[in-house]
């Protein structure tokens, strides 16, 4: 309710002075002056905080700086920031200037992003959200799905870390390798896979967890150098959910057998453990029957893949209407003189860019859909949902 027609400042002063007296009924006082309790408390609070000057009317109109940017410019800057969420005000301002000619001040751009919530206070840890690749395939015959993992480690008597790399066929339970490696880096694991592919052929899919070197948490879709190489060989990837080893249950049961039958029971140095694991593998494949295989052994069920390993391809073939760009050592591709970051895990490989409109390109690596490039904002947006990626025919 408005104040009654009289000298407003005198009324407000009189009201707040009376409201501060002991024993006053505040609600009745407000009724006497014809105002609501909400308004009464507002003037009382201002008087206590700022004295008589706090009772002066304050303009409700927002203060507009003569240098405030037009609404259209603000919208364009916000659009660029959404396309490049990790870029600072200086980079966004430069991108805007190259696109539209005029250049707003860096402080104005920064103020807009702060008010819009795009610039957060420092000190907060950035959390990487890994959108893993999941292509859950039910194995119906050998080589439909291979599973891979590292067995939990232990130490040999010469104090060396023994952490076997294990690879098996999901359908037949055939164990290809149980091999402790000197280092669990990409090159060592890749060399093991190369030997297995030469001996047994290529599987259609490989299931793993989300750890190094099978995946990389900071890369799009968790792509690592190893997983990129497997995709180049036309092998589908399937990663279990983090913290859900039961999704690779058959592999985990095999690890349990190793723990009960080998780990902690072998005397000797690292080489003795390595030899014992190979003996265990042969017995598992050729001697031990499995109820799920109608009491056959894995060696009686497994057959080699018809997909022959031809080595690492020099490049990926894409449909004729695709554009192609090679990824630089820094993970960048170049489009219309603009450098666009994709992923350093893809360095050295050629990507396929499918035009879907005048300003939009779909980005593929072999069969894997990676995301979109918006030519208006010169930005790459990777896909978010876990999804099956189908190979382009």
Image (spheres, rainbow, N blue to C red):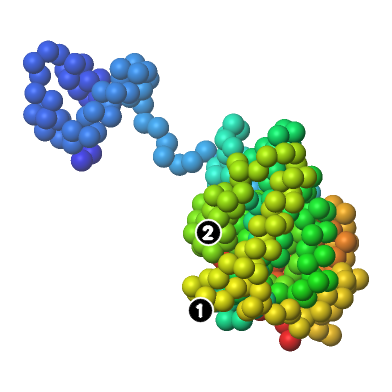
Look at the picture and state if 376 lies above or below 96.
below
- Give coordinates of residue 388: x percent, y percent: 60, 73
Looking at the image, the residue that sits furthest to the top is: 22
Residue that mark 1 sits on: 294
Asked if one can make out residue 83 in the rendered structure from this viewpoint, the answer is: no
**Disc 2 designates what residue?**
253
Q: Measure the C-alpha gap from mark 1 to mark 2.
A: 18 Å
Tell me the quadrant of the picture where the C terminus can be found: bottom right
What residue appears at the point 79 percent right and 59 percent down from the top-left corner? Answer: 192
The spot of residue 318 in percent (x, y) is 82, 80
Q: Residue 109 vs residue 58: left or right?
A: right
244, 381: nearer the viewer: 244
Q: Which residue occupies 74% across, 49% down?
A: 274
Q: Earlier in the sequence, mark 1 or mark 2?
A: 2
The N terminus lies in which quarter of the figure?
A: top left
288, above or below 257, in the image: below
């Amino acid at each position: 309710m408005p104040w009654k027609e009289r000298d407003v400042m005198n009324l407000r002063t009189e009201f707040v002075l009376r409201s501060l007296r002991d024993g006053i009924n505040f609600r009745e006082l407000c009724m006497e002056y014809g105002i609501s309790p909400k308004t009464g408390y507002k003037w009382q609070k201002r008087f206590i905080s700022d004295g008589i000057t706090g009772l002066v009317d304050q303009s409700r109109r927002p203060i507009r700086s003569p240098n405030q940017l037009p609404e259209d410019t603000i919208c364009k800057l916000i659009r660029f920031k959404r396309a490049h969420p990790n870029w600072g005000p200086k980079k966004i301002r430069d991108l805007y200037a190259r696109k539209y000619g005029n250049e707003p001040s860096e402080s104005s751009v920064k103020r807009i992003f702060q008010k819009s919530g795009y610039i957060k206070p420092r000190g907060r840890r950035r959390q990487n959200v890994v959108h893993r690749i999941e292509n859950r395939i039910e194995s119906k015959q050998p080589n439909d799905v291979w599973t891979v993992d590292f067995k939990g480690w232990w130490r040999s008597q010469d104090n060396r870390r023994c952490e076997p790399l294990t690879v098996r066929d999901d359908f037949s339970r055939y164990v290809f390798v149980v091999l402790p490696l000197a280092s669990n880096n990409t090159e060592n694991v890749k060399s093991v896979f190369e030997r297995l592919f030469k001996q047994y052929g290529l599987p259609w899919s490989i299931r793993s967890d989300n750890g190094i070197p099978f995946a990389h948490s900071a890369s799009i879709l968790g792509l690592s150098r190893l997983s990129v190489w497997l995709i180049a060989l036309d092998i589908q990837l399937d990663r279990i959910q983090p913290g859900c080893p039961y999704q690779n249950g058959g592999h985990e049961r095999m690890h349990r057998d190793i723990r009960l039958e080998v780990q902690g029971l072998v005397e000797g140095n690292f080489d003795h453990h390595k030899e014992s694991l190979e003996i265990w593998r042969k017995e598992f494949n050729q001697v031990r029957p499995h109820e799920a295989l109608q009491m056959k052994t894995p060696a009686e069920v497994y057959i080699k893949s018809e997909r022959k390993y031809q080595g690492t391809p020099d490049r990926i073939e894409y449909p004729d209407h695709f554009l192609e760009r090679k990824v630089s050592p820094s993970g960048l591709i170049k489009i219309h003189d603009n450098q666009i970051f994709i992923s350093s895990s893809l360095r050295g490989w050629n990507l396929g860019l499918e035009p879907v409109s005048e300003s939009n390109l779909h980005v593929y690596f072999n069969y894997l859909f990676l995301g979109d490039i918006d030519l208006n904002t010169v930005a790459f947006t990777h896909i978010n949902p876990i999804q099956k990626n189908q190979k382009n025919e």
